Image: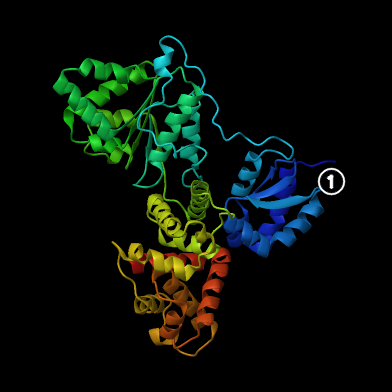
Amino acid sequence: MALPPEAVWTMACAALKNELGEGAFGSWVAQAAVREGAAGNLVLVTQTGIARDWIRRNAWRRIAELWALHDPQGRALELKSRFELDAETAAPAPGQPQASAKPAAAPAAPTGDASARAARPTGLQDRFTLDSFVTGPSNEFAFAVARRVASWADGHFNPVLFHGPYGFGKTHLLNAVAAEATRAAPEKKVVYLTAERFLSTFVRSLMDKSTAAFKDELRTADLLLIDDVHFIGGKQSSQEELFHTLMALTAEGRRVVMTADRPPSALTEVDARLRSHLSAGLVCGIEPADRTLRLGILERKLQLLARQHDFRRPPEARPEVLEFLADRFTDSVRELEGALNTLVARLSEGVCTLNLDEAQAILRPHLRGGEKRVTVDDIQKATAEHFGMKQADLISERRNRAIARPRQAAMWLAKQLTTRSLPDIGRRFGGRDHTTVLHAVRRIEELKAADPQLTRDLETLTRKLRG
């Protein structure tokens, strides 16, 4: 009897989890899924190219065995990252005509009053779309809510507030919702404003004695989106106007979506009535991107940059370079993308062959700016204290496991947190060769996937060292 591919994969995963251990399975395999390719073939799809490469090196042979064992139809299974599959699906099938480079003619504008409503909202950034938003555990719920709002689905919560610190994707989501909602229902009126634009336009309407027109523009919107609403805090007349606009729209069933850097309860500078009304809707937090999501964002960004710069070769940077960026730029997705922009601006498609030392050299000014400068000595002292040993042990010739593993961890930290070269790091660990340091870095990367405690130790040390 034929089994659905998902059922075969579930059975294979049960065995893989036991064999690989929960750490390695959770880090590299758990987020993979079986999908159908453009030609009807079955593909095991990973979230990132790095996860694909790890599976190919460490688990692909066993996965093929388990797949063959549980699939009575003997179907073949391929391995690809989701970016590869998306590109393959978007490409025309063999024998089909290529898409014309000439843009299609714009659809005729609706007649009458609808023609004014079909216009694209002003102030949007084209690069922020739902398709270009990379999801992970930290933002999946927010993304699902955004898609539901953009599709004009019934049973919506109103208002919706996305909140999270700077650079976590709030503006991206709001732009994407505005653009997609306009495309899905061009007859509806969608208004997108930053809080700064709301303030300046409202103040101008007071000076010009045109507040009636300002109110009418907002209160006739089918969907009103305001970015960074926390900036309105402390401006009493503007808050008053926003509150009454919010009340008027929600009373008529019109939709409102906003973003803020904190949940409503923490917006202490915002009027209590407005805060209460925001709390009464759907409050949706966006958490910091985890490492897997940061890697996915880098890969998607590289794909976009490759198209913009017309790369001739496949746009896949070396895994160690992307891992370095993901581990170093953790505070903001914008900073993470900015680091990749810097590399591509300097090297164009040469970024695909860039090695780790070269990437660190290019980004050295960005790595030191605004953060504590960490030295190898700092790392050795912190590591020795954390593992209950002496700093001298880390540079000694002793090789027993109780010392060798912390020494390897310290070398890994030195590679991540300093701009020292491998030979330089080796000299500071008792005159060791650069190949020893390279082996230590690779060994720690392998162990992190299977040892949650080691991962926690490294994260604790990293936070301590960065202050």
Residue 111 sits above or below residue 180 on the image: above
Closer-to-camera residue (178/166) = 178
Residue that appears at 65% across and 44% down: 88
Quarter of the N terminus within the rendering: top right
Quarter of the C terminus within the rendering: bottom left
Question: Mark 1: which secondary structure?
Answer: loop
Three-letter amino acid code at the position of disc 1: Gln
Tell me if residue 124 can be seen.
yes
For mark 1, what is the residue? 73
**Most distant residue in the top direction:** 112
Residue that appears at 32% across and 66% down: 368
| x, y percent for residue 309 | 49, 50
**Most distant residue in the bottom direction:** 397
413 with respect to 271 (left or right):
right
Tell me if residue 239 can be seen.
no
| x, y percent for residue 447 | 56, 69
| x, y percent for residue 131 | 52, 39
Residue 249 sits above or below residue 62 on the image: above
Residue 209 sits above or below residue 465 on the image: above
Residue 101 sits above or below residue 300 on the image: above
Crowding at dot 1, Cα within 10 Å, few <14 / some 14-19 / many 20+, comes out as: few
Closer-to-camera residue (95/28) = 95
Looking at the rendering, which quadrant does residue 370 occupy? bottom left
| x, y percent for residue 63 | 73, 57
**Most distant residue in the front direction:** 102
66 with respect to 199 (left or right):
right
2 with respect to 216 (left or right):
right
Q: How is the image coloured?
A: rainbow
